[in-house]
Image (cartoon, rainbow, N blue to C red):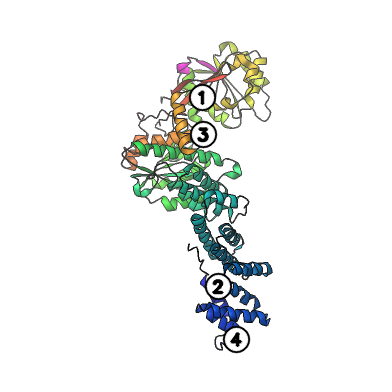
Amino acid sequence: MNKKNITVLAFFLILFLSKTSFSQINSDFDRAILSYESEKYEEALLLFEKVISSGNNDYLFEAEMFRGKVLSKMGNFEEAEIQILDLIRKNNSDKFAIDLRLDLANTQLNLGKYKDALKSLIEIIESGNNPSDVQHAKAYSENLVFEHLDHDSFAEIIKDYSNHKSLPFLIFISGKLLLKKGNIIEAKKQFFTIIQNYPDADEYQSALDYLEKRTTVTSSINTSESSDLLVAVLLPLNLNENNNSHVSAEVLEGIKFAADEFNGISNSRVGLVIRDTRGKREEIEKIKRELGNNSAIKAIIGPLYSEETDITSEVFDAADVPIISPTATDDDLTKKYQNIFQANPSFEMRGKIMAQYIFFVENKKNIAVLYSEEGYSNNLARAFIAEFETVGGNIVTVQDYSIHSTKLTEPIREIKKLISGIDGIYVPISDSKLASLILSNLFLNGIDINLYGNQDWFTATGFESSSSLSNKLTFTSDYFFDYRNAEFLSFSKGYFDKTGYETTRNVFYGYDAAKFLFGILSNSSDGSILKENLLNSNNLLEGFHNNISFGKDRINRWLNIVRFKNGVFELVDKFRYEYR
């Protein structure tokens, strides 16, 4: 932007000219307008002042406004600013509000009052009803900031703004300023803020584009022009209403870090096309229309949640593009669609894995089952029972209860009656709050036997009240980290240094799934070969949170086996399900 001038939009001048009959140009105001248009500013100034002094109310306000414009054109910026500020105070309508603010910003800019000029432009953004006015004000503001303000002074100005019209724009400019400084980490946080909080803002798509193309460690990553392989990343990035927006952000960071790492060591280049599903079918269908015919996209990573993964698999079914969900766990997804791969084992698979582990590794042949009627505890129990009997085990008794009544006395007494013929109890839960209740009821009934469970035991409390039983608890988990492991510590440090974030299980859900896909994708020239290679059991990723290897049903068949012992969770095994 030229620091000496902000161009007055032509339609403002046309507005005033249209009010004047030029069939008889004989009034002072008519002649003043013509002089202004002809850039005869001294003559125009005299004529406008004559109209003002005449007290003719028909054109008094317009004459005062154009006097401010003329003063600015003549370089008398101090007097122009006084004139315009006075008019803004006197103006009781919206008729000339935008034009006055624009003139004021122009004058303040020429006076070197950059912060004041920016504030004037922000007022246009907040109050303007015409999209064209707002976009012009935004363009002028951005140029002003980049030419005359640094990030710290800009941040000081905008810290008190909260208007939903201006704040996303100001956050976006803050992100761009941070990129200009080379502070990629903080820039990403600004763009994420827009995506997660302002999905309807003008800056939403631009923030998504910047997050996709400008906020990576290596400059070549994530741009289709420099990438041999494109992968679409479909995640619900705007989930603030469910307080889960951080999950998607962390998964995305893990995926991007894997892409950056892959591009640093591979002869191929992978690019990411990031799209926000917003958790809505209509958005997924919109994305399909945009990306569905793009043959350069070889695979899709995401979404996260089972319901949304179901929709995405349906919408993209005809596209025949492999979809790798890092976290979806529903049992029926791969049965309904041929394009979906679940990097996180389904509930059915989890029950089967525990059944095989108990029978083949623990060598326990007689098991009781205690589960709740509601939730995925039921899914896990049914899958466990079927698999345990398939491999030759004996289900001694099956007892259920309702999580709504939490009355466990009767089912546990039934187990107690048969305890002499039981090697252990499979106790899948769908609510970690039930763990302490189950332990205390088993203890009160004198049951001291091996217990086997699912991941919800990982987050349970109350183990200390039944230490003997707690030390006999073994369960499956799709994530377990040895925080003392040298490789884990090295990764965590490198990840933090490059992203500014701590590692979490959500990061590794994204990182491990993406790393597995990229490694296979580089050796797969088309979709059919890619699917074939994804199903190749020899393709194994020894991941941080869990190993990944797909079976014939396109579900990861690995889980961690974790044991609680003397107050500490420890990894016992990484176990793979074998098809029978």
Is disc 4 placed on a helix, strand or loop?
Answer: loop
Dot in front, 2 or 1: 2
Q: Is residue 361 magenta?
A: yes
In three-dimensional space, the C-alpha distance between marks 1 and 3, rounded to whole angstroms, equals: 25 Å
Q: Is residue 146 magenta?
A: no
Q: Are marks 2 and 4 in contact (CB under 8 Å)?
A: no
Q: Position of residue 133 (x, y in %)?
A: 55, 65
Q: Residue at x 54, y 25 (%)?
A: 454
Residue denoted by label 3: 502
Crowdedness near tag 4: few (<14), some (14–19) or many (≥20) residues, C-alpha within 10 Å: few
In three-dimensional space, the C-alpha distance between marks 3 and 2, rounded to whole angstroms, equals: 53 Å
Q: Earlier in the sequence, mark 2 or mark 4?
A: 2
Image position of 454 with respect to 90: above or below: above
Q: Earlier in the sequence, mark 4 or mark 1?
A: 4
Image position of 134 with respect to 346: above or below: below
Residue denoted by label 1: 476
Q: Position of residue 514 (x, y in %)?
A: 42, 37
The mark found on residue 12 in the picture is 2
Residue denoted by label 4: 27
Going by the picture, which residue comes out furthest to the top?
420
Q: Earlier in the sequence, mark 1 or mark 3?
A: 1
